[in-house]
Every structure is written in structure tokens, then in C-alpha cells.
Amino acid sequence: MNTLSHIQNYYFIGIGGIGMSALARFFKSQGKNVAGYDKTASVLTKELEAEGILVTFQDDISEIPQQFKDSEKTLVVYTPAVPKENVQYQYFIEEQFILKKRAEVLGLISSNRFTLAVAGTHGKTTTTAILAHLLKETNAPVTAFLGGVSEDIQSNLILKGDEVIVAEADEFDRSFLHLSPNIAAINSMDADHLDIYGVNEHLQASFKAFAALLPEDGTLFVKNGLPLEGKTIGIEDDADFSAINIKIVGGSYHFDLKTPTEVIEGFLLNLPGRHNVLNAVTALAMALEYGSPANQLSQALQDFKGIRRRFSYKIKTDQKVLIDDYAHHPAEINAVFEAVKEVYPKMTNLVVFQPHLFSRTRDFVDEFAEKLSQFDEVMLMDIYPAREKPIEGVDSQWLLEKIDNPNKHLVKREELTAKITKSKAKVILMLGAGDIGNEVETVKRALEDEI
């Protein structure tokens, strides 16, 4: 099936995922019937239900609405994170429904539209969101599928037209190879997902395969120094597109953009961290390549409010700061640390980290320990397993023992809020890609009572 034109019903197994929910919203906006299953309720599933999408949390065939049991008119969309023994998944297989991975469906949607895609092991969500915002604000007819919830529109789907697609190109399970990009960016290729790729060389090969998807008249932007051919992006260096004259004022970045032909002055980015300046440069370069008016991009960038769970301020006072972030890789934790030290150099900090995946913890335990040791105080939650079964000997206690910091603790979920409120740290960071985000509001309320 290379077209979706005859499909009336879309059923999502794992509908609460960030990429899956964006697709569900897209098909709902097209007037299709949309429903799905997820194992747990979340902020996202509640939002989907409020938008008229039926979500069930019982993995049972009886929970599937009758109209979605018509195999001629129904497409089942699933995520690789869903275990194959899932009862609903098995039902659709046995009944010979058409099942497609999320990435395949995104590929079909984008196949006949001009597509801008952002890849990279870090930074792709923020870069994609900035790019989509720039195009939307400069009146491009864009539909954007984001890997995070935009604080500007409180959604992971932007609908401003259907001629142009902006998509986050996910390297997990080689998903991004289903896309057909016209303009693409790769802003990092650090080792990750070694449970899928085995060794880093295979991961890098998949990025090269993604780059090869571009047509002859396509354009690839790459972070300066990556082993790929393309227009380079960087910060205060000799890249084709580089942020120069950077100044930090009140946690925001003022910079000028050097391009191959000119210097465009007067950009303001209201996100902390130099890594976000690189993300902004990538998005600006892609928008300029698409044809966005240069004189409108400065105001558009200044208006960008950020992404939910990407250095999201939950409390921001002189006495206490609480930041919620999705960081789940050593390089991302380091980027958060550097941003905090840049913005709050004199305030003590506490990191609360929930490791994500047993395999990732095993593969990068020494790197995690090194980066976490930099903080003034460290609290570790148990590993969030997501799609994985436990690995013998791999747990948070093992990671804790490797952290070189006297102020380190293993914390149970039920005692998390009490432990955080007792800390003398002024800046508190809650990091991880699991369900640590569900604890943030409780911690926020407790800290506000203390202030």
C-alpha cells in the first residue's frame, strides 16, 4: 500500500508516544476516525481525548471500537517500542490488517510534498520546532510533525498548510530512511541506540544512508566537523553558517548569523545553552535555503517560546529554580550542565536523573557517571525500562557507585519530593526521557510552598 487515500480509520498502538500522537492529530484534522491504545495515561493522552480521539488503556481486543475492526478501511499504526506480544497487535496481525510503523506512515505523508527533515542524536527536536516556527511565522504553507510539544501552540503538530512538511528524522530503528527529504540537516552523530545498531559505525552508516536520500537538487546541512559532505553549521567558527558576536543577556543569546554571502544581524534566542544556539543556526540556515525572507526571521526567532521538557522552567525566582528536561544521554546531560553554569554560575545545583533503558545505561555507564559527577548534588531514580527487560547487574545502584561525588543518593519515587525539598540546592534539574516528568508538578507545588 503506497497511498493512504482509501483509509478511513486509523488505530494507533502506542498512541501516547510523542511521534504517534502527532500523527493521530494529523489524521483527526483530515476528518478521519482515530483511536488508539497506550499502556498508561499521560498529559498527552488526556489532550488527545479532549480533542475527540478515543484512547484505551486496556490491552484487550474488546477495547477496540467496532468500526476499527474493518480491515478494508483501517490502517493500524504501531511503534517499535510496543512489545510484539501485545494482545491488540497480535489480533491485527492474525486478522491480516495492514500494519505500518509510524515512520512508514510519515514517509507516505511526506513522499509527494516538499520536505525539510532534521536528524541527529541530539538537538533534532528543538531544531525541528524552531524551523517549523520560523516557517509558520513567515507564512509558509507548512505541516510540521514535532518530537516535542511546542510551548507556542501547546501541540506537537503544526497545521498551516499542506504543501511543505517539516519532520523530525528519528534514527531509532533506522526510521528516518522512510523519508524523502529535499532539505535536511544532521547536527550530531554521537553513539546511541547501540541496542539496535550494535556498534557506532553502524549508526554512522545509517546517517550516511539518510544523507543519500536527498535528490541532486537537495541540500544537506551538517554540523561542522562531522564526516559528511554538505553545507556546514557552527558557532563562532569557519562554518558556512555560523553564529558570531554572541552575547548573553539575562539568559538569552544575542548573535549575528554569518552566511556564505552576508552577515545577518540582530538575532535573539530566548533559550539557554550554547547548544541551542547551534540548533537555531541550523533552523535559520534551512529556512533561508527554503526561501524564507531573511528580514522576517529575526522577529520569528525571538518569538519562539521553546519545547515542553527541553530546559523548561517550572520555577524561576531568585530563591529557587526548577527545570524540567528530557536529557537522557551523557552529551545531553553535559549540555544541560553547561547551560546551568552559564546562566546560574553562583547558585548551587541538584540533578535528579532517571536513567532511560537498561541497554543505554550499560553502554554509557562511565560517561553518565562522568557527566553527573559535575553537579553539586546528584539523586538517581530507578532505571525506566521502556521497551526493555532488565539486564543482570545493570541498575541505578551500579551507576551511583561510579559517580565521583560525595553528595549522591539513590531515591525511591515515593520519597522523591521530600528529598528534593530538603536539599539546600537553589537550582534543581529533573532529567530523563522516562516518566520522571510526571513527578515535576508535585515537586513544583512542594517547592513553591517552601519559597
Image (cartoon, rainbow, N blue to C red):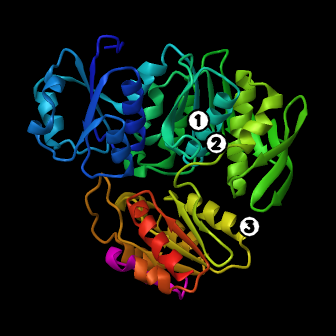
Residue type at mark 1: give it. Val
Point 27% across, 17% down: residue: 8
Point 72% across, 55% down: residue: 274
Q: CA distance from mark 3 to mark 1?
A: 27 Å
Residue type at mark 2: give it. Asn
Is residue 29 covered in magenta?
Answer: no
Label 2 belongs to which residue?
A: 187
Magenta highlight range? 404-416
Disc on the earlier residue, 2 or 3: 2
330 lies above or below 200: below
Q: Are marks 2 and 1 in contact (CB under 8 Å)?
A: yes
431 lies above or below 264: below
Q: Position of residue 117 (x, y in %)?
A: 57, 30
Disc on the earlier residue, 3 or 1: 1
Residue type at mark 3: give it. Glu
Looking at the rendering, which quadrant does residue 436 occupy? bottom left
